[in-house]
Image (cartoon, grey):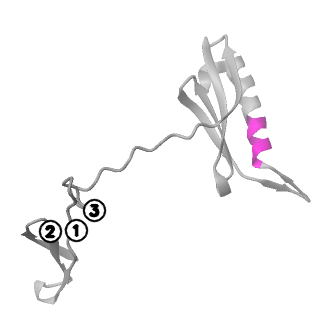
């Protein structure tokens, strides 16, 4: 399939004419899209053009601080945070002190008749990782 784009520029309206071609150029379908108008500040309302309005920066959502510790072997401080990922479970993350070292996502586990919540699995994993970092912190 070949796509040929032709632009018609009339004042502040950008309206491309797109030809979708299959096989020979004689069988091209012509599709005309509505133009996206420019606002007063010079940005387009459509997110697909070169002068689109910039998206706002993503705001980081801090996790729930579970633990902070100092590893004598690596001479670094570490933080353990839990982040709720909704229907995807809970994520445990270990930072040193700002950069992510390791993270693991947990989902609810059904053990026979009982359900082990993801939060409990994440906290248990974080405790094991803390012991591992304090014992052999170079190989995380």
Q: Residues within 10 Å of mark 3 (few under 14, many from 20)?
A: some
Task: Name which of mark 3 and mark 1 comes first in the sequence.
Answer: 1
x, y percentage for residue 134? 70, 18
User: Which of 24/109 is in front?
Assistant: 109
x, y percentage for residue 94? 63, 30
User: Which of 109/63 is in front?
Assistant: 63
User: Are the residues at dot 3 and dot 1 in contact (C-beta closer than 8 Å)?
Assistant: yes
User: Which of 97/60 is in front?
Assistant: 60
Which SS type dominates the magenta stretch? Answer: helix
| Residue 45 marker | 3
Tag 1 residue? 36
x, y percentage for residue 125? 74, 36
Does residue 122 lie above or below 66 as drawn?
Answer: below
Does residue 81 lie above or below 106 as drawn?
Answer: above
User: Are the residues at dot 2 and dot 1 in contact (C-beta closer than 8 Å)?
Assistant: yes
Read off the magenta span: 118-125
Q: Is residue 89 magenta?
A: no
Secondary element type, mark 2: strand
| Residue 104 marker | none
Tag 2 residue? 13
Residue appearing at x 73%, y 40% in the figure: 122
Q: From the viewer's perspective, is 55 left or right of 130?
A: left
Q: Is residue 123 magenta?
A: yes
- Quarter holding residue 96: top right
Q: Residues within 10 Å of mark 1 (few under 14, many from 20)?
A: some
């Amino acid at each position: 399939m070949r796509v040929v784009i032709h632009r018609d520029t009339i004042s502040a309206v950008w309206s491309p004419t797109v030809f979708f071609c299959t096989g020979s150029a004689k069988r091209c379908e012509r599709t005309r899209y509505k133009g996206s108008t420019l606002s007063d500040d010079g940005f387009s309302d459509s997110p697909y053009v070169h002068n689109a309005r910039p998206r706002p920066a993503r705001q980081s959502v801090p996790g729930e601080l579970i633990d902070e510790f100092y590893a004598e072997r690596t001479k670094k401080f570490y933080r353990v945070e839990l982040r709720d990922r909704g229907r995807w479970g809970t994520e445990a993350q270990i930072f040193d002190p700002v950069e992510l070292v390791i993270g693991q996502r947990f989902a609810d586990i059904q053990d026979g008749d009982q359900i082990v919540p993801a939060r409990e699995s994440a906290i248990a994993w974080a405790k094991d990782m803390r012991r591992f970092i304090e014992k052999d912190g170079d190989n995380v």
